[in-house]
Structures are given as C-alpha cells and as structure tokens.
Amino acid sequence: MSTKPPTRGVDGEPRVLHPWDEFARMKEPPSAFACATTRDWPGYFKAVAGKEPRETLVRALEIIEKPGFAIDLGCGEGRDTVELLAHGWRVLAIDGHEMAVGLTGHHPRLPAEARDRLEIRHAEMEAVELPQCDLLNASFSLPFCRPERFDDLWDRIHASIRPGGLFAGQLFGDRDTWASLPDRSHQTRRKVGEMFRGRYKLEHFEEAERDGEDARGNAKHWHVFHVVARRCPDGASQDAKSPTSSAGGSCP
Ligand SMILES: C[S@@+](CC[C@H](N)C(=O)[O-])C[C@H]1O[C@@H](n2cnc3c(N)ncnc32)[C@H](O)[C@@H]1O
C-alpha cells in the first residue's frame, strides 16, 4: 500500500495537505539532537513541534524596550518567530529547509492579526541578505553554517544589527560532540570572546557543558554558549584585540 497522501480528495478536488498535518504520518524521530546530528530537519521539526520559545529569546524580549524589526535566522518550525509576533514585532524568518517555511507560516500559535508582520524566506544563511534589524535571533542554528562561510556570516550578522540592537542565540563550543563533524561551525571560548569583545555588551552569557544521551542511548556531549548581547553604539568600540580572560566584554 502506498504511504503517499492522496493528491485528490473523495470529491476529486485537489487535496492540500496542511504542513502541520504531515507530521501525523511521519514516524516518531529518535530525538531532536539525533536528527540534528544528521541534518534530518523534518525529523527534528517533528521532535520539537509546538515547543515553547528558546530561553535566550525570552531573555532578549524581557530587556528590549519596545518591539521593532527582528530576523529569526534558522527559524525551524517557528517557535521563536511566533513569540516575536505575539510581542508585536515585525519578523523576517529565514530557513534553508522548505518544510520550515510551511510550518512557520501555519504555526498553531501564529496570531492571525500578525500575518502581515511576517515574511518568511527560504534561503541559506551562508548567502542570504540580512537587512538592518533591532534583534537578530539565531537559536541553535549557527553551528549549521558551513565552516568556511562562518566568519563572513558573523560579519553580516554584526552589520545587520543596529547599534543598540540585540543578538540572541547560541554558539557551539569546540568540546561539543558535533565539533568533529566537518560541516559544522564550532568556536572556542576565546573565539567567542573575540566575536563580542568591544562591540557588544553581554546581557547574558552562559557557557554550558554536559553529557547527555537520547532514549536510544546515543551519547552527545554538549558545549554551548547561550548569548544575549547588545551592540554598542557606533564609535564606542574598544580595541577588539585587547587581551582579556573573560569571553566578550562591555561597551565603554
Ligand atoms: C537545530 S534547528 C533550530 C531551529 C530553531 N531555531 C529552534 O530553535 O528550534 C537548525 C535550523 O537551521 C536550519 N538550517 C540549517 N542549515 C542552514 C543553512 N545553511 N541556512 C539556513 N538554515 C539552515 C535548519 O533547517 C533548522 O531549521
């Protein structure tokens, strides 16, 4: 028997599958991280479907003064995008997987009145144009940038955040299990420090490291930097190369 959905209903009319309905016929994935290990994004989206917004975004929304324009880079199934919309933001949601576009655009928590404040773009972070924004949110997406494009991506992220605007998201450390995968972008603590020092005030910085495993016993060592940082006003930058043992820094 075919497992493909019918393309026509009983009335002969074309049957359009709702993006979230597709989950019903997908088999249960082992775990979100097992899917992310292999870039099985449909499996990942099913594993995290309907979850609450990421903590770094929640922190950013708590400290930012008023809603503006946000980019959600690597939006996934839309958990952070819908939170931004619910808080009155205009959002450009970007993801390299087509399914993310459908899921975000039909997210169950997407406020109906907010649809005209949302633009969703199917694009690779390595090449996409990033317009000026008040908040750039990149939850658990930056490690999936091709390593040879990471520095360029970070330059474009920095250029897109207005002075006084925020970055929220994660960077993955060099002791994380995935760091050995050749297509991942991981940073040492020193490198993370250089990315923010003198250019951002760190509102929240947490280096988290722990061993974990999924229901099938697949081991994964996590080494993650959770960051919420405010870009310094123009002309306020310190010497980015000045040595310091702490990751990041603050505006002068
Ligand atoms: C681990 S998921 C995180 C999704 C979501 N931000 C969250 O917090 O659940 C990584 C996301 O990045 C997207 N992604 C991976 N590589 C990408 C690329 N090169 N360009 C754009 N998006 C990419 C995937 O499709 C996926 O939605």
Image (spheres, rainbow, N blue to C red):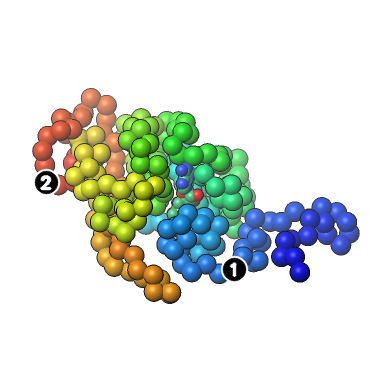
Decide: is 237 above or below 99: above
Q: Position of residue 123 (x, y in %)?
A: 52, 39
| Figure disc tally | 2
Q: Residue at x 31, y 53 (%)?
A: 179
Q: Position of residue 199 (x, y in %)?
A: 24, 34
Mark 2, Cα crowd under 10 Å, few <14 / some 14-19 / many 20+, is few
Whether disc 1's CB lies below 8 Å from ligand 1 is answered no
Amino acid type, residue under disc 2 in the picture: Ser
Q: Position of residue 238 (x, y in %)?
A: 17, 31
Decide: is 3 above or below 170: below
The residue under label 2 is 245
Secondary structure, mark 2, is loop
For discs 1 and 2, the disc positioned in front in the rendered view: 1
Q: Quadrant of residue 200?
A: top left
* Residue 18 seen anywhere in this rendered image of the structure: yes
The residue under label 1 is 27
Q: Nearer the viewer, residue 250 or 144?
A: 144
Q: Position of residue 176 (x, y in %)?
A: 29, 57
Decide: is 47 above or below 172: below
